[in-house]
Amino acid sequence: MNIFDTYLQEIKSNVLTQIAKLAYDDNLTPKNLMEIPEMIIVEGGTRVRCCVYKERAIVNERVKMALGGNPSNPIMVEVINIACDECPVDGIQVTPACRGCIAHRCQAACPKDAIDIVDRKARIDKSKCIECGLCLKACQYSAIIKNTRPCVAACHAKAIQIEGETQKAVIDSEKCINCGACVFQCPFGAITDKSFITDAVKLILDSKNNTAYRVYAVIAPAIVSQYSAIPNVTEEKIFSAVRKLGFHQVVEAALGADIVAWNEAAELAEKGFVTTSCCPAFVSYVRKNHPAMEEHISHNLSPMAQIAQVIKEQDPGSKVIFIGPCIAKKDERTLPSVSPLIDCVLTFEELHALIRAKDIDLTLEADAPIEDASFFGRIFARSGGVATAVAEAIKEQGQDFEVKALSCQGIPEIRAAMLKAEKKQLEENLVEGMACEGGCIGGPVSFTQLNRGRIKVERFGQKAEDKKIGDSLKIYEKQPYKPIGAKTVEKE
């Protein structure tokens, strides 16, 4: 059964799966790597490019990205030039739908006199046009359009430009926030994220079955929305399968979210105004585009880093691999405050490749109990979840403070909120920033972004045995981590 939203994701998964198989076999030789394109793009197979040779050349570039990409490139996404289809960049133009009307509102609206009427039709002089778009709004027949490349349109951080005679996409590392919107939106798969899947496998193999050190998988709660296409695959089966990949234990990132919500509530009550620190793309956007607001970003670690800190305090020498729907987490891992805590970051796409590489059938897995987090920690995965959790923590702490939250999903909403905050015009005292539409359930490296993700997250949250945040933290406070299914007894 196909679980992918697009054919591009399937190709990407096939490459990652082959890389993972070779990594598990400790057989990543140049010869074996060179054979991957022919294994994936076979003679006589379905063609989506001009020829089999170009398709194989692109797969070869995907192999390079699966091995970590260009190490000199500081950002976590790169353009595969040979895959870039040089989408039309004609900008604003008049279509055949122009009716040759008498009003000529488009001409009147143009501030640069760039529109002439020729043979009763509007014509745009591109040498004068400044792409302001006023003519689009003025035309009553929608006969004027603006062609924008999908990657450029998706990048609200304005980090993608079209440069040079080749008209290939170029990413400005100074502006890029690693949100991954361009990766998801490029219909040709010409922009992709660097993979550290081989690093993860090496960490697992070098642990010698978790005897040299223990390897923990920390999984984001959005995982529950990923296998909806396969009947009867529960989150408990997924966690069980992940452990079979060679991990000592699988831990919910949502427990880190409980800790963050608790600490962020105290910080909010003390300072009176904060923005959340959970989404690294949001944090990066604020720092690069609204530096005056940086001081208001919560000083707490993200849930990923917070739970990793707890694990490493309780199990010194252990290794932690985070698994989620986010490319920006790979960038967050490079921060000085986070790099000692997180040893590797994988995406849901990469997790699925590992499962395929080990021939694990999710439908046959046993239901391993999941008991880490509260309802509120688990709903961090959807927009509004962080704000709800912080308000709950304020309540449980008995704080005399009213939370007025603004939940922003997507950079346009975030930009509007930050501009208001800079001008002291924002009524709310807590800004929850999520770079992806819908929150983490809309992450760019999920293999499905179906709308039922929010419902799945809510249902997963309802399964939490400990409905309150404080109860969740008490159970796990200063307790050593346990294998999945083993119940931790609260100390008296």
Image (tube, rainbow, N blue to C red):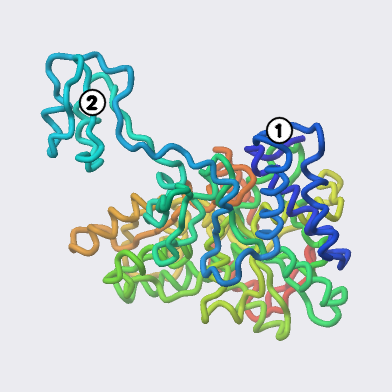
State which mark lies toward you, 1 or 2: 2
- In the depicted view, which residue is nearer to us: 241 or 377? 241
User: Which residue position holds label 2?
Assistant: 123
**462 over 308 or under it: above or below:** above
- Residue that appears at 22% across and 33% down: 125
- Residue that appears at 30% across and 70% down: 291
Q: Is there any visible trace of residue 467 in the rendered image?
A: no
**391 over 363 or under it: above or below:** below
| Left or right of residue 126: residue 116 | left
Q: What is the three-letter code of the residue carrying label 2?
A: Arg
Quadrant, the N terminus: top right
Tag of residue 47: 1
Q: Position of residue 425 (x, y in %)?
A: 18, 59
- Residue that appears at 32% across and 22% down: 95
Quadrant, the C terminus: bottom right
Q: What is the three-letter code of the residue carrying label 1?
A: Arg
Q: Position of residue 58 (x, y in %)?
A: 67, 48
Q: Is there any visible trace of residue 299 in the rendered image?
A: yes
Number of other residues with Cα within 10 Å of mark 2, as a class: few under 14, some 14 to 19, many 20 or more: some
Q: Earlier in the sequence, mark 1 or mark 2?
A: 1
Q: Residue furthest front?
A: 165
**207 over 126 or under it: above or below:** below
| Left or right of residue 422: residue 27 | right
For residue 418, what is the image quadrant?
bottom left
Q: Position of residue 262 (x, y in %)?
A: 48, 70
Q: Position of residue 59 (x, y in %)?
A: 70, 49
